[in-house]
Image (cartoon, grey):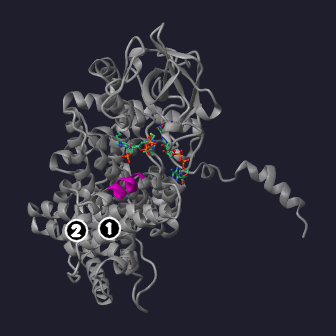
Amino acid sequence: MASALKVNKDLVRERQKCTFDVKELTYIWEGGREFTEERQRYENIVYSVKELQDEVPELYLSHKERYESSIRKACILQRLQNEYGKKHKVLNTRTIRLVGYGAIRDISPFLLHNGMFIQTIEGQGTPEQQAEWMPKAQAMQIIGTYAQTELGHGTFLRGLETTATYDVKTEEFILNSPTLTSHKWWPGGLGTTVNHCIVAAQLYINGKKHGIHLFMVQIRDLETHMPLPGINVGEIGPKLGFQTANNGFLGFKNVRIPRKNMLMKNNQVLNDGTYVKGMNEKLTYGTMVLVRVSIVSDAANVIARAATIAVRYAAVRHQSQLKANEPEVQILDYLTQQHKLFIAIATSHAFSTTYGWLYKAYLQVVEDLGKGKQDHLPELHALSCCLKATCSRDSAAIVEQCRLACGGHGYMASSSLPIVYGLATASVTYEGEHTVLLLQTARYLMKAWQMALQGKVLAPSVSYLVDSLKSNKQSWQNTPEFIVKGFQHVAAGKIKDAFHAIQKHVKAGKDYEDAWNLASVQLIKASEAHSRAILCDVFWRGTIIKSSTASPGVAAVLDHLVQLYIVYWALETVGDLLLYSNITKEDIAVLKVKYEELLALIRPNAVGLVDAFDIRDEVLNSTLGSYDGRVYERLMEEAMKSPLNQEPVNQSFHKYLKPFMKRAKL
Ligand SMILES: CC/C=C\C/C=C\C/C=C\C/C=C\CCC(=O)SCCNC(=O)CCNC(=O)[C@H](O)C(C)(C)COP(=O)(O)OP(=O)(O)OC[C@H]1O[C@@H](n2cnc3c(N)ncnc32)[C@H](O)[C@@H]1OP(=O)(O)O
Ligand SMILES: Cc1cc2nc3c(=O)[nH]c(=O)nc-3n(C[C@H](O)[C@H](O)[C@H](O)COP(=O)(O)OP(=O)(O)OC[C@H]3O[C@@H](n4cnc5c(N)ncnc54)[C@H](O)[C@@H]3O)c2cc1C
C-alpha cells in the first residue's frame, strides 16, 4: 500500500472517519485470519517477481501476444504456487484465482486445469485413476481442461453428439465427432495450451447408448505439442472478455483410448463390455455442482473489486455543488451515489456469507455420498443452481452499476471496470446458463410444493413452504427477521402460482411439458424469489453468528450491511410484498426512511468497508481505484502508455489524412 504522504487527501480524511477495525473485518470477510495471512504472504511473493510486471499494458498487445504473455505468467505463477505449497501449505483456490487475476490481468489459461480438470479426476476417478493422474496433473506434467460443451449443445447435455464406442476386442473406446455441431467448443485452455482433456461423450456398447460419460483423452504430444492423430484442435477467437482463457474447439476422428480412461468412480465398463450402473447417473455432473458453488464466491469477489474501485473513486471525485457558493462535493455525498454503491458492498458480504454456508452443504453431501447416502443431493443441486444463477446475474448488474457510478472514466479500460464486467457477465452463462439453472431449481420447487400440500416433511431450505400453508394473521413488522419471512411468503406465493399455472394448462388439455413451458416465466420468477429468500435468510443468520464474536465497531457495520441488503431488496420487490405478504403502505414508507438512515450510517465507513476487502493495487489494476487515490495522475500516466502517444505524428497523417484534406473541396 502507498505511503500516507502520497495518498489523496479525501481518502486520508475518509479513512480517519472510519469507526471500526478494518483488519478485523478483512478476517471476517475472508473466512478467518489464517486465510488472510496466507493470501497476503503469497501475494508478497508473487507481486515481488519482476517477470510478472508488465512493461506494456496487456491491452495494447495483439491477441497472439496477449496469449503468449498470459502463458508465460501462468507458468511463473504455477511454479510459485507449487513451491509455496511445498513450503507452507496448499493454497485455497480462491487465493489462487485472486492472485492470478492480479498477475495475468485476465483469466489464466490454466483456470480450467486448476478449476475443473483436477476436480473431475478427484471427484469422478477411481482410486487407481486418481493415483495415476492426480500427481501428474498437480505437478503439471499433464495439463488439462474440461471439454463438455459442443458447437450444437451446451445446455442440453443429453443432446451432446461426441461418441465413445467401446471396442470389446481391443478393450478401447473409439472417440468420434460425427457432425460439425459435435465439435467441442468453448473449453478453457483447449485452444493451444492443454495436452489432455476430460471429454464428455455419449457411451455406446454393442450398439446400445448409455448416455453421457467422462473420458480422459490425450490430445497433444507431450514433447512436440503437436495434435495427436485424429485430433482437430484450435482456438475459437476473441470474445467479449476472457481473452486469455484460450477457449478452444476439438474434433475426434477414430481416436482410440484405453478402457481405463473412462472415469469410473460412478458407472463402469468392464473388459467384456458389461455396463455397471452407479448409484445415480447425475453424479457424472458432480464437478459442475462444485463450480456452481464456487461461482457464488467468485461473484462476491468481482463485486468487491468493482465496489473498491467505484467507492474510492467516488471519494476522490468532486463534481457539482449541492448548494450555491459552496465547493464542489465528493460525489460519494450524493445519496443516489450511495444508493448505487453501498448495495454493492452489502451484496459482496451477502454472497460471501452464502458461499460459506453453501460450501459446507456441498461438503456434507460429498461425505454422505461416500457413505452411499444421496438424500440431500437434489436439494444441493437446486440450491447451487439458483444461487449460481442469481449471484452471477446480480454480480454482472452490480459491476455495471459501479462502472456507471464512475461516469466517463468508468468506461476507460484503465479503470479495469470493463474487464471486471467481462468476467462477471461470463459467469451468467458458463457452468449452466442463467434461465436454464433457474428452471432446474423450479423443478425442485414444484415437487416441494406438491409435498407440502401432501403434508410431507420438506428439506430445510424449502421448509418455509409448510409455514406458508398455515393461515397468516400476524401483522407485518419492519424487523429483518420479519422481512425475511416476507421474502419467504413471496417465494411461496410465486411457487404456488406457478404450480397452479401448470395445473391450469394441464387441465385445459396440455401435456405437462407444454404446460411447463407456458408457465416458465412464472417458474423462473419463483426460482428467483426463492434465491432471494435464501440469500437474505442465510446472510441475516450468518451475520448474527459473526457479530457475536466481533468487536462492537465491526458488529455495528455488519449489522448496517445486512439490514441494508434486506431493506434494499424489500423496496426493490415491494410490489411482490404487497401481493404476497401483510406489508402495508405505511410499513413501506417506514422502510424507505430506514433505508435512507442506513445509507447515512454507512457513509462514514464507506472507504473503510472497501479497504476491508483488502484487494491489492496489483489485483485492482485500476486508475480509479488504487489505494492512494491518485486518480487523475494515473489516468494521464496510463494514457501516455498508448502506442499512439509514442510519436508526435502518426504515419497515417501523411498516408491518408493529408492527401484527404488536400483533395477535400469547400
Ligand atoms: C481455481 C478455480 C477453482 C474453482 C473454479 C471456480 C470457478 C470456475 C471459473 C470458471 C469456469 C470457467 C468456465 C466454465 C466451464 C463450463 O462452463 S463447463 C460446462 C458447463 N455446462 C453446464 O453447466 C451444462 C448445463 N446443463 C446441465 O447441467 C444439464 O444438462 C441440465 C441440468 C440442464 C439438464 O440435465 P438433464 O440430464 O437433461 O437432466 P434433466 O432431465 O433436466 O433432469 C434429470 C434429473 O437430474 C437432476 N439433475 C440434473 N443435474 C444434476 C446435478 N448436477 N446433480 C444432481 N441432480 C441433477 C435434475 O434435477 C432432474 O431431477 P428430477 O428429480 O427433477 O428428475
Ligand atoms: C466464457 C465461457 C467459458 C466457457 N468455458 C467452458 C469450458 O471450459 N468447458 C465447457 O465445456 N464449456 C464451457 N463454456 C460453455 C458454457 O458452459 C455454455 O455456453 C453454457 O452452459 C450455456 O450453454 P449454451 O451455450 O448451449 O446456451 P444455450 O442453451 O444455447 O442458450 C441460448 C438461450 O436459450 C435458452 N434456453 C436453452 N435451453 C433452454 C430451456 N431448456 N429452457 C428455457 N430456455 C432455454 C437459454 O436460456 C438462452 O437464453 C464456456 C462458456 C463461456 C461463455
In the picture, the quarter occupied by the C terminus is: bottom right
* Viewer-nearest residue: 313 or 343: 343
- The span shown in magenta is 440-447
Residue identified by numbered label 2: 467
Query: Can residue 301 be seen here?
Result: yes
Label 1 residue near ligand 1, CB within 8 Å? no
Residue identified by numbered label 1: 492
Q: Mark on residue 259?
A: none
Q: Identify the residue at image location x=41%, y=87%.
A: 322
The vertical placement of 86 against 542, above or below, is above
Q: Is residue 273 left or right of residue 82?
A: right
Q: Identify the residue at image location x=23%, y=54%.
A: 459
In the picture, the quarter occupied by the N terminus is: bottom left
* Viewer-nearest residue: 106 or 148: 148
Label 1 packing within 10 angstroms: few (<14), some (14-19), many (20+): many
Rendered-image quarter of ligand 1? top left
